[in-house]
Structure formats: C-alpha cells, structure tokens
Amino acid sequence: MHNAQYRLASRPEGAVRHSNWLYTEEPVGRPAEGEFLVKVEYLSLDPAMRSWMNAGRSYVPPVEIGEVMRAAGIGTVIESRHPDYCVGDTLYGVWGVQNFAISDGTGVSKVDTSLAPAPVHLGVLGVSGFTAYFGLIDVGKIKEGDTVVVSAAAGSVGSVAGQIAKILGCHVIGIAGGAAKSAVLLDELGFDAAIDYKSENVRARLKELAPKGVDVFFDNVGGTILEDVLARLARGARIVLCGAVSQYNAESRPKGPSNYMQLLVSRASMTGFVFSDYAERFGEAAVQLAAWLTDGRLKSLEHTVSGGIERFPDALLDMFAGGNTGKLVLAL
C-alpha cells in the first residue's frame, strides 16, 4: 500500500503553478506506540495555503521545500496504538496533502458525522465557521442594527460571516465576483444586498446601499475593495482583517490603502486576527453554530471536488480564479 503525496517543490513567484508541486509516492508507514494511522478522506483547500508557501514571516511557519503541503482535513483511523483513538474514529487534523497520515493526537479532534456530513466540519462547523464567528462577534463587536459589509462573501468564511450577521439582526451587504455568486448571496443565504465587483462600481454602490455608512467591514480581500469601503465608513466603524486574497499572488510588495486616514476621520478601528487565537473557545462556537445549522438559520455551502489527490493542483488554481462558491473541499 502506497501513500500518494504532494510536496512543495519550489516557492511561487506570483501565481501558483503546477511546477511548484512534486507528486511523490512512498510506502504507508506503521504507527509507533502512542500513534495512529489515518486514511485521509477530505482535504480543506483555503486561500491561506498561498501564504504558507512563502518563506516570509507569517502567523504560522512556512511549508519548507520538500515537505508535504500543509492542509487540514478529515479522515478515519485504520490502525491505532494510541489509547484515546480507536479504529473507525473520524478525526479532524492537519494531515497534509496525502492519502495517509500518522499522528500522536496533537491538534486532532473527533468529528461527529451524525450531526452533519464530514465536509461541513471543514466549513461551517470548522475553521471557516470559527473564523466568521469570532471575527464578527469578538473583533467586529457587531450589534443589532449595524450595517455589515463582507468581501469575498460567497467564499468559505464570507458566506458564514454574512449569515451570522443576519441572524444577529444586522443589515448585510455582500461583495462577490459575478452574477451567479451575487444570486447565491441573495437567494440562498439571505443577504440584504449584493455587489458584483466585476461589473459594478463598489464605492458608488456602497454609497447607494449604505447611505449612513458601514459599521462593520469583514474583509477577506484587501486591495482596492478595502479602499472602497474605507471611503464609506460610519463613525466608530470596525474593520475586521481576516485575509487579503487579492494580494496573495502579487509579484511585488502590495501597497497599503492610500486612504487609511479615513480611520481617523471616522474614529474607526482596523484589527487583524487569526482564528486560532480563540482555540480555548472553539467549543462555544461549535455549540452555537451547530444550533443555528440545526434550526435552519445557518446554511452550509460546500464546493466538493472529487477525483482524488491528483486533482489537488488544479483545484487550488481554480480556487484562486474564483471558481468555488462556499467551502472548497477535495474528496480523496
């Protein structure tokens, strides 16, 4: 039995290319005492993977050249020499882009697939949901009646953030690329308004849709869209910096927002965060997200790519081209 893997062959300059990956196969290892072997079934594909490929300083160490590419996923224990994990357990962990992984249990959690299918635990009931929950509630400090704007609103985090804001009584405007994604925001997820940045003037539409200004901006994009929203802030606004997908493939150092002084004018704040900062409260988020999911107020959107690990490079490139709606999952 062999383990197929994708390893980082070189650091990309600009957009990721197929040449940045090395496909390898090696015999499946056997777990030592205190370890277990997992057959990986689903992998989470995320924009943050691009930043992990860089050598520079970030919130986690970079993936080194020659290492299996970092990726979270869900799998099933097929052999165990660990007292806390049994054959048949379904687990979440950072397994990497490979078919099998050996673990000692560090950073691993059990997944209840009776509550929701495994891919949902990579999205709404996983990192995407936790990021949206803590970003809005703790960092954004949203309150009923706020006007909330979400960029990359049809993505894995944005789609959850917008729904949470609606549940908590806010007026929600989503920014996404293309008419199809805008329709999903309005017709499936219940956003109040959608802006198609590919065909509309974002700044002009925000003036129309948020005449009193934006109270909370949940930003997954950065770049010119961040500048557009900075121009439309309400007094005391909070900008939640979750990501900057528009910058990840930039070949030169991106420039900061030229109008950042709008923060001063509006007495606003702009705060970055990482979901793992709230690890001790994941249980709180999981209970609340599951309750909203169960009562139908929160919907789970997954874009699942089948075909096995060989589809990884193409699926990742498609994500950066905006090909997915909701959480992108690779089924192995």
Image (cartoon, rainbow, N blue to C red):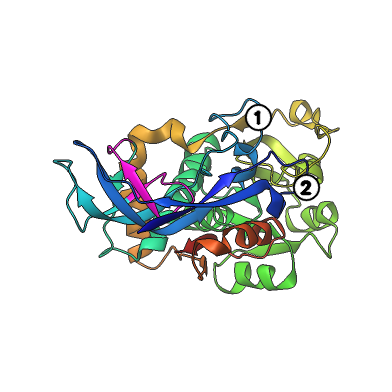
Of helix, strand and loop, which one carries label 1?
loop
Residue range corresponding to the magenta coloring: 92-106
x, y percent for residue 138: 48, 36
Asked whether the viewer can see residue 124, the reply is no
Task: Indicate the quadrant where residue 257 lies.
Answer: top right
Q: Disc 2 designates what residue?
A: 225
Quarter of the image where the C terminus is located? bottom left
Q: Mark 2 near mark 1, Cβ–Cβ under 8 Å?
A: no
Q: Amino acid at mark 2?
A: Ile
Question: Which one is nearer the viewer's eye here, 206 or 70?
Answer: 70
Mark number, residue 55: 1
Mark 1 burial class by Cα count in 10 Å: few <14, some 14-19, many 20+: few
| Residue 104 within the magenta-colored segment of the rendering | yes
Question: Which one is nearer the viewer's eye here, 6 or 139?
Answer: 6
Q: Closer to the N terminus: mark 2 or mark 1?
A: 1
x, y percent for residue 221: 70, 46
**Which residue is rendered at x = 37% and y = 55% of the image?**
74
Mark 2 burial class by Cα count in 10 Å: few <14, some 14-19, many 20+: some
